[in-house]
Amino acid sequence: MFKQIKQLFAVFDEQQPSMQEHDLKTAVAALLIEVMRADTKLEHDEHDEQRTLTVTLKKYFNLTDIEVNELTNNAASSLDDSIDYFQFSKQINEHCSAAQRIEIIELLWRLAYADGEIDPQEDYVIRKVAGLLYVTHTDFIAAKIAATK
């Protein structure tokens, strides 16, 4: 009987999709890309956001253009395969301090502001991510204000 129960759980475990582990760079890049994708107004301003994404990743992680391109491709692919933001926020929460998580929220706001206005979907994504990163509302607003300066 015990053996049958173990076999049942083994089959159940095999059927469960395993959550992919991401490194910190991929997690941050994926969330930045998600904010960029959330903008429903995709015109010439998309280039501003793409440029801001590239500059942000180069500066924040000290990467070359080639490394940024590889990172964004990997992050976009991971994002396409994901069903939520948890796998990305988990990595950030495990490896970043509260101050660093607030800084990441500020980076998301800076990207959202790159085209000169905040789309409601961008706002929604950043609010959702802030909650997953345990950023308080006060710090969320402070990061938003800091991103405009």
Image (spheres, grey):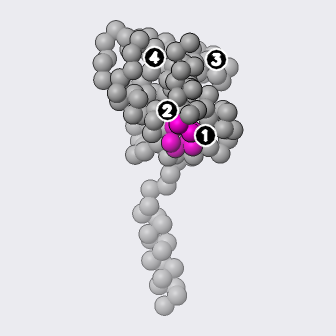
In the shown orientation, is residue 147 left or right of residue 33?
A: right
- The amino acid type, in three-letter code, at marker 1 is Ile
How crowded pointer 2 is (Cα within 10 Å; few <14, some 14-19, many 20+) is rated as many
Q: Residue at x 64, y 17 (%)?
A: 59
Residue range in magenta is 130-137
On the image, the x and y values in percent for residue 55 come to: 57, 14
Q: Nearer the viewer, residue 14 or 38?
A: 38
- Mark 3 or mark 1, earlier in chain: 3
Mark 2 vs 1: CB contact within 8 A: yes
* Residue 127 at x, y percent in the picture: 45, 35
Kindly identify which residue carries mark 3. 59
Name the residue tied to disc 4.
Answer: 113
On the rendered structure, is 143 left or right of 37?
Answer: right
Q: Residue furthest bottom?
A: 1
Relative to 143, is 101 above or below? below
Name the element at disc 2. Answer: helix
* Screen quadrant of the C terminus: top right
Disc number lying in front (3 or 4)? 4
